[in-house]
Image: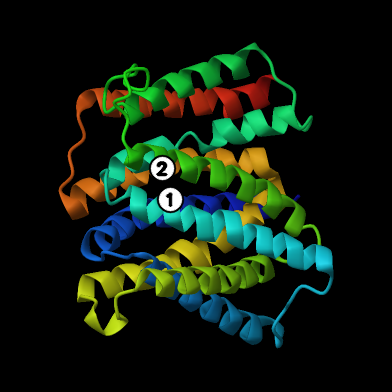
Amino acid sequence: MPQQAVTLTYLKLIGAMFMWGGTWIAGRIVAQELPTPLSAAAVRFLLAGLALGGVALLTEGRLPRPTTSREWGSVTGLAMTGIFIYALCFFYGLKHIPAGRGALVVALNPVVAALAAWFLGQERMNGIKWTGIGLALAGCLTVIGNGDPFALLHGAVGIGEWLIVGCVLCWTVYTFIGRHATRTLSPLASTLWASLIGAALLGLTSLVQGASHPADWSAAVWASVVFLAIGGTALGFTWFADGVKQLGAAKASAFVNLVPVFAVLQAVVLLGEHLAMPVLAGGLLVIVGVWLTTHISERTA
């Protein structure tokens, strides 16, 4: 790949991580204001799908769509894992824990992706990688335990923490499905159809729940939903899918450790959140562990 293309891919991934850092702030606003936030999630992905469809028509002159049962299965898998189930864990998790702390837990994503790749025989492990995984897990336990790495053993971890851990598992599966989907579909096409299918699933679920009417949403909720749709989904998902296609799942996932950095900074500025030093230390341990698992181990392989 030409150096210019590599640089552009890196810039897209950094931009996607900045957007995703902001989704934690927007998600926290929606989760706190709406009793049933899945209606907002449905609108988010519907708007994202429409925006991506418009981009496709402008740039390609047509609406790309899957043509085989395997491609439809891939985008449905993306919708189920990275959109529908992830949204359930994301919004209801943010009803219970601060945005910055949730993002620090999700920083574990690259480590889980590396473990999954090793388990599937796609990557080799070495001492540095195992050290990084150990550090990242210790840091994640500290963040989940709100500063106490042994809180899980004491049964002191709440539903909010478990739901955010669910986000990590969903995103790992989404990443690997996306890797297969983009072999035959463009990142735009896969994100477009996953968004529309996910929006339908979320919409149906919110109707069963008795969703709040969009006309009753505050300006803050609407601004958050629009940002989640355009920045967090249309741009973020497409840029990340392109990164997976160009660099592979493991390398692209390494950029995810920028999300908690951006999220914590934005949470301090926009929401006035302040995390305890042990939690921040745990988050730093996660990032160092991820760095060892991905960046350093790649250089020494």
Disc tally is: 2
Inspect this view and state whether residue 12 appears: no
Circle number at residue 164: 2
Q: Residue 78, percent across and down? A: 63, 58
Residue beneath label 1, please?
89
Q: Residue at x 64, y 86 (%)?
A: 57
Q: Sequence-wise, which precedes: disc 2 or disc 1? A: 1
Name the foreground residue: 264 vs 142. Answer: 142
Element at badge 1?
helix
**Are the residues flagged by discs 2 and 1 in contact, CB closer than 8 Å?**
yes
Q: Residue at x 59, y 63 (%)?
A: 238
Q: Is residue 217 above or below residue 110?
A: below
Vertical comparison of 224 with 4: above or below: below
Q: Quadrant of residue 120?
A: top right
The residue under the point 20% across, 46% down is 268
Q: Disc 2 to disc 1, how far (Cα)?
A: 6 Å
Q: Quadrant of the C terminus?
A: top right
Q: Is residue 140 left or right of residue 156?
A: right
How crowded pointer 1 is (Cα within 10 Å; few <14, some 14-19, many 20+) is rated as many
Between 211 and 74, the one lying in front of the other is 211
Label placed on residue 231: none
Q: Secondary structure under badge 2?
A: helix
Q: Is residue 291 visible?
A: yes
Q: Amino acid at mark 1?
A: Cys
Place of residue 12 in the rendered image (x, y in percent of width and height, measured from the top left): 54, 56
The residue drawn where x is 37% and y is 42% is 103
Which quarter of the picture shows residue 299?
top right
In this rendering, the answer to whether 204 lies above or below 125 is below
- For badge 2, the amino acid type reads Ile
241 relative to 253, above or below: below
Please name whichever residue, 110 or 301, is drawn nearer the observer in this view of the structure: 110
Q: Position of residue 37 (x, y in %)?
A: 34, 65
